[in-house]
Every structure is written in C-alpha cells, then in structure tokens.
Amino acid sequence: MESSLTNALSAIGGTSGTIGLVVEGMDEGMAAEIRSAARDFRHVGTVRSTFGAAAGSRGNQIASVIFLFQLSNLNSALSDLLGSKILTKQQLLGCLEALIYSGAAGSSAIQGMAVSVLQSRIAMMGSAAGKINAMSQLGWWSGKI
C-alpha cells in the first residue's frame, strides 16, 4: 500500500491517477528535475543500500581494526590501574594516553565510514538537489569530526 501511495503522490501532477502540483508553463527540463529530486528523496534517501560502501572500504576496515587495538590497550591499562593496590602517576598517565588514543582512533573510523556512506549516496543521486543535499551533509561530517 505504501508504494502505491508513494507512486500516486507526485511533485509534478497532471497525469492520470496522481496527486500533485500542476504549474502552468513549466518547461519539461524543470519538471524532470523535480521528479528526479522527489525520486531521490523517496528511494535513494534511505541509507540501507549505502552501508556496503563503508563496510567494503579497506581504509574503513583498517581504521576499525586500529580502533579495536586501541580499545584493547585501554582495557589493559584500566586493568593494570584497577588491579594494583597503589596508584602511580605512570599508571594514571598510561590510562589517560590509552583513552586519548582510543578516542582519536574511534573518531577517525566514524568519520571515514560517514564519508564513504555519503560519497556513495552522492553517486546514487540523480537530481542536482539530491546531490547538493548529500554534499552538504558530507561537508558537515568532514568539518565536525
């Protein structure tokens, strides 16, 4: 039922069996771009199909393995700290160092995966509006993390 309703709702109406806005005098190129943008946001807008790009990237796999190693180092440092009866400055600095390295490796892995997913979405988009939307999200991720 959802797919039937989605197909009946059109950004540019005027065909039989569809609901949408009819604008007189709109050229066919603009109408095609609006239809393409609506299709992008309905179908390509789901990120389910783009997670394969993040999982298949060697760079993302390496970053994830490095993150796991850093978490292992953090676990070892915390075990040493919690297992000793006397806390030393060296143990505290080791835990702090492992925490910083784990955070850096984790944020690097997350940023790489987000960039891969968004680049895959940009390639899938057929409309200029869809590409610009995905590119703006890519710019946000690249600048924030």
Image (spheres, rainbow, N blue to C red):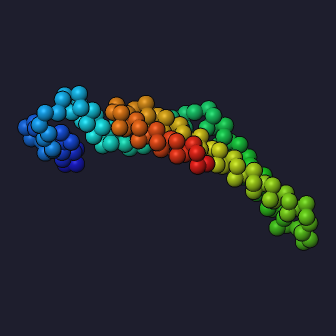
**Image-quadrant location for residue 127:** top left
**Image-quadrant location for residue 3:** top left
Q: Could you tell me residue 31's position as x and y percent?
A: 21, 33
Q: Horizontally, is 37 left or right of 46 in the view? A: left
**Image-quadrant location for residue 30:** top left
**Residue 57 drawn above or below residue 79:** above
Q: Horizontally, is 129 left or right of 142 in the view? A: left
Q: Residue at x 73, y 46 (%)?
A: 69
Q: 132 or 44: which is nearer to us?
A: 132
Q: Could you tell me residue 142's position as x and y percent?
A: 57, 42
Q: 11 or 105: which is nearer to us?
A: 11
Q: Horizontally, is 112 left or right of 100 in the view? A: left
Q: Residue at x 43, y 40 (%)?
A: 134
Q: Is residue 65 in sight in this rendering? A: yes
Q: Could you tell me residue 89's position as x and y percent?
A: 91, 64
Q: Residue furthest bottom?
A: 85
**Residue 50 drawn above or below residue 106:** above
**Residue 23 drawn above or below residue 86:** above
Q: Could you tell me residue 2's position as x and y percent?
A: 22, 48
Q: Residue at x 85, y 57 (%)?
A: 94
Q: 80 or 66: which is nearer to us?
A: 66
Total labels drawn: 0
Q: Is residue 77 in sight in this rendering? A: no
Q: Residue at x 79, y 61 (%)?
A: 78
Q: Residue furthest front?
A: 25
